[in-house]
Amino acid sequence: PGEWFHRHRPEDMVLPGSRHDPLDDAPAHLQGFRSIHPRDQRNWVAPCGFGDDTLLSQAIAATYGMVEMIDDGIGRIVARLDELGCREDTIIVFTSDHGDMMGDHGLFLKDFMHYRGTLQVPMLIDAPGRSPARTDALASSIDLCPTILDLCGVRAFDGIQGQSLTPILEDAGAKVRERVLIEDDIATITSRLTPFPAKTRTVITEQYRYTRNSKGEEQLFDLGADPDEMNDLKRVDAPARADMLEHLADALIAADDAARGAPFNRRY
């Protein structure tokens, strides 16, 4: 809004190289999104395609302005904590529930797209007594609860999901996970009436991303060699596919076991 909307010029934006991905071997619902243009929707709430570079440049520029506005607001909150003298006694966490495709693979918005554009979100943690550092260690949003409890010296409750990230906050080279599980569900009746799968499950390791949905569709990418996720390996790398299927099975069992830690405990 206001001054932030015009902070960046559309002509200066770098467009994603993956925007011309033909998605020939992608799940059917992703191919279907490509045929929907944002201007064909009365409101921008459903995933869609984004084949217009001019419109995409404008959207990216506006998004940069939006991010800058949020950054400014966070700066004011932190400044107020300093004024109140409680900054050093406060844990600050900044993250997001999802990303936005923003033209990656020719797609826009989110939902049922388990590409890095929607899955890999920012996570910044500022905790008393911790030095600034960056890490490429795997982490999940469900790790925030056990992390905050750990930082506060509170014992985690029985059945809690997630892993405390405090070892990483103390040593940026530390690892607490070998994989991350992502789960995406919609109502079964919706799946029956649309191309959307009722369930989509993804497991990510340091090297691979493997996705499988309830319609039996799969994706497998080597994130190290192919960070833009352009070359699907599901039909050509049987050993990697078998290994990631095992990771997915183990992750699903572990998630279910964690949720059963306390009597009558539900998954979420």
Image: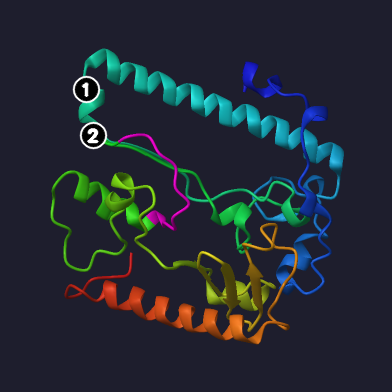
Q: Earlier in the sequence, mark 1 or mark 2?
A: 1
Please give the label number shown on residue 71. Answer: none
Q: Position of residue 50 (x, y in %)?
A: 79, 50
Q: Main secondary structure of the magenta part?
A: loop
Q: Determine whether label 1 and label 2 are within 8 Å by CB.
A: no
Q: Is residue 45 above or below residue 13?
A: below
Q: Amino acid at mark 1?
A: Cys
| Residue 31 shown left or right of residue 81 in the figure | right
Q: Quadrant of the N terminus?
A: top right
Q: Secondary structure at mark 2?
A: loop
Range of the magenta residues? Answer: 131-141
How many badges with numbers are in the image?
Answer: 2
106 in the magenta segment: no
Please give the label number shown on residue 129. Answer: 2
| Quarter-of-image position of residue 225 | bottom right
Q: Position of residue 193 (x, y in %)?
A: 66, 75
Residue at x 68%, y 82% (from the top left corner): 237
Instruction: Name the residue nearer the viewer: 55 or 143.
Output: 143
Q: Secondary structure at mark 1?
A: loop
Q: Quadrant of the C terminus?
A: bottom left
Q: Which residue is mark 1?
A: 86
Residue at x 65%, y 69% (from the top left corner): 221
Q: Amino acid at mark 2?
A: Gly
| Residue 171 shown left or right of residue 116 in the figure | left
